[in-house]
Image (tube, rainbow, N blue to C red):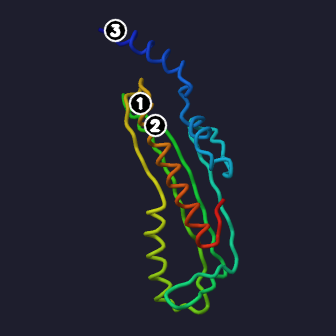
Amino acid sequence: MELRKFISTIICEYLNDRLDLGGNIKDVLIKRIPFLKEYTIFKNTRDEDRLSAQRVVYNKDVKVVMADKILEFPQYNISSEIVYYPHKINENTFHNFIIKNEFHMTQPKDMDDLTFRVFLMAKKQLEEKLSYRKDVMVKSNEDIPENELDKIINEMNRVLFKIEEFSKKHHFNLF
């Protein structure tokens, strides 16, 4: 029985090496998510398979139409963080894919504290809508199925297109 498992593992490793993926999901993400060209990619010396990338854009004096008023935010910054990391637990590997988009702003002079707090709560919901999180569990000796990885990459690109569109529409471009 152990020989069968060993042979199966060797065959899986051989087939995975033959795929264009090279078995390294981090490199596949960098290659297939074009937005990452605009991000700062950080090296992780403790975990070579981990992808940590960040993009921050600083905006001053951003005007936003709210109801019938035009508000001017002294600072309205956008940060976008993309993270991938595998985590092995016993015989399973959990692959975590995360895009976290956030808006950081200072309170306009024309806005009272209560309205600003409500605005921040609405902003939090928008951030969640424009972010992404997916966890995939596979056996440690297996890779994520290619069609599932394609779907994840497409979803990540879709979220990044949405944040790009949103930021352009509101005149504080992220890219």
Question: On screen, 69 above or below 165?
Answer: below
Where does the image place residue 16, in percent across and percent down from the top left?
Answer: 50, 21
On the rendered structure, is 124 left or right of 111? left
Q: Position of residue 5 (x, y in %)?
A: 35, 13
**Percent x, y of residue 84:** 52, 43
Disc 1 and disc 3: Cα gap in Å? 22 Å
Mark 1 residue type: Pro
Q: Disc 3 and disc 2: Cα gap in Å?
A: 27 Å
User: Closest to the observer: 78 or 164?
Assistant: 164
Location of mark 3 (residue): 4
Q: Which residue sits at x=41%, y=27%?
A: 140
Which amino acid, mark 3?
A: Arg
Q: Give the residue pinned by disc 2.
A: 149
Image quadrant occupied by the C terminus: bottom right
Circle 2/circle 1 CB separation < 8 Å: yes
Neighbours of disc 3 within 10 Å: few (<14), some (14-19), many (20+)? few
For residue 95, which quarter of the picture?
top left
Q: Which mark sits nearer the N-terminus, 3 or 2? A: 3
Q: Secondary structure at mark 3?
A: helix
The amino acid type, in three-letter code, at marker 2 is Leu
Q: Which residue is mark 1?
A: 145
Q: Could you tell me how far apart the alpha carbons at marks 2 and 1 are, in whole angstroms?
A: 6 Å
Q: Nearer the viewer, residue 87 or 64?
A: 64
What is the residue that sits farthest to the top in this orientation?
3
